[in-house]
Image: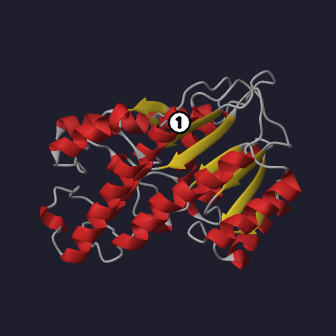
Amino acid sequence: MEKSERAKERKEKRLQEISLLRTIPYSDHQRWWSAETVAVVTGGNRGIGFEISKQLAAQGVTVILTSRDHSVGLEAAKVFQEGGFNVFCHQLDVLDTASITEFCDWLKQNYGGLDILINNAAVNFNQGFDNTVEYASQVITTNYYGTKNMIQAMIPLMKPSAAGARIVNVSSRLGRINGKRSKIEDVCLREKFSNLDTITEELIDQTVSSFLQQVQDGTWESGGWPKTFTDYSVSKLAVNTYTRLMAKMLSDRPEGQKIYINCYCPGWVKTAMTGYAGNISVEAGADTAVWLALLPDLAVTGKFFAERREISF
């Protein structure tokens, strides 16, 4: 109990430090961005995505928030515009190829591309002590394949710059390979996911497909999958691993065309996704995404962060 209390105290202290850091303005020599810098935030109409959009816009970045429901997205953008921020909305379904293509064409025609991509769109149907896999297919498809779809679609549109383009994937500690509450029991699979040399897109796809097949067969509980929010945890394991793979694949791009990709855990945030039962404010939950997106002289890629610190996969 004492150990748990100490850990809680350390986390609260760190969140207080981050809250203070957010009040410190970037100096002119740190600001590699301008009003011409374009950030795309998927699922930006509410929750963490809305707050990420707000914090980026407050730093002077032009933000395009996307929403499956266009009218809801327009209302969100209107709130920002009334506050004097350069925030605009476009309809986007990250699972619809036609929707993604239309968005890409619009983005290129109106902005010439983008500099920052925040993959925030995600779903979760478990709360409290629930662990249903009734919606596992939707969770895996949205959280993993939706993220992958956007990365592949946006990379060709990312603008060349000395600072490098940035991709930030909103993920979770529940997707850690050896997590306390979300450990993969299959030792062989754990080893494959731990070793960057053995990670392939096929491995990730086969793993989530195997999980979904076991869900369909009713055998998933004996499959060695994470015990907490199983479908969500598997989806975020896939996102984390794909982040590492893409960092490796993008690492040989020449100077001026660099793309840095990282993921982060916002924590258990008080949003609709958690039934507003989280213990972290939405401001604190969005902070690390914005910090990574704007980090001056960013040379780090393929890493996992929480509370502005690197954590293990």
- Is residue 232 or residue 284 the one in the foreground? 232
Q: Quadrant of residue 8?
A: top left
Name the residue: 47% across, 48% down. Answer: 266
Q: Tell me the colour scheme of the image.
A: secondary structure
Count of marks placed on residues: 1
Q: What amino acid is found at the position of numbered circle 1 in the picture?
A: Met
Residue 150 located left or right of residue 184: right
Task: Farthest residue to the left: give it.
Answer: 222
Q: Position of residue 89 (x, y in %)?
A: 76, 65
Q: Quadrant of residue 26?
A: top right
**In the rendered image, the vertical position of residue 105 relative to residue 186, given as above or below:** below
Q: Position of residue 134 (x, y in %)?
A: 31, 77
Work out whether residue 190 can be spotted. Answer: yes
Task: Farthest residue to the front: give it.
Answer: 202
Name the residue: 63% across, 73% down. Answer: 68
Q: Secondary structure at mark 1?
A: helix
Name the residue: 85% across, 52% down. Answer: 111
- Is residue 248 or residue 234 the one in the foreground? 248
Within 10 angstroms of label 1, few (less than 14), some, or many (20 or more) residues? few
Q: Position of residue 141 (x, y in %)?
A: 45, 66
Quickly name the residue at label 1.
249
Q: Position of residue 276 (x, y in %)?
A: 45, 65
**In the rendered image, the vertical position of residue 184 relative to residue 277, given as above or below:** above
Work out whether residue 92 can be spotted. Answer: no
Quadrant containing the C terminus is top left
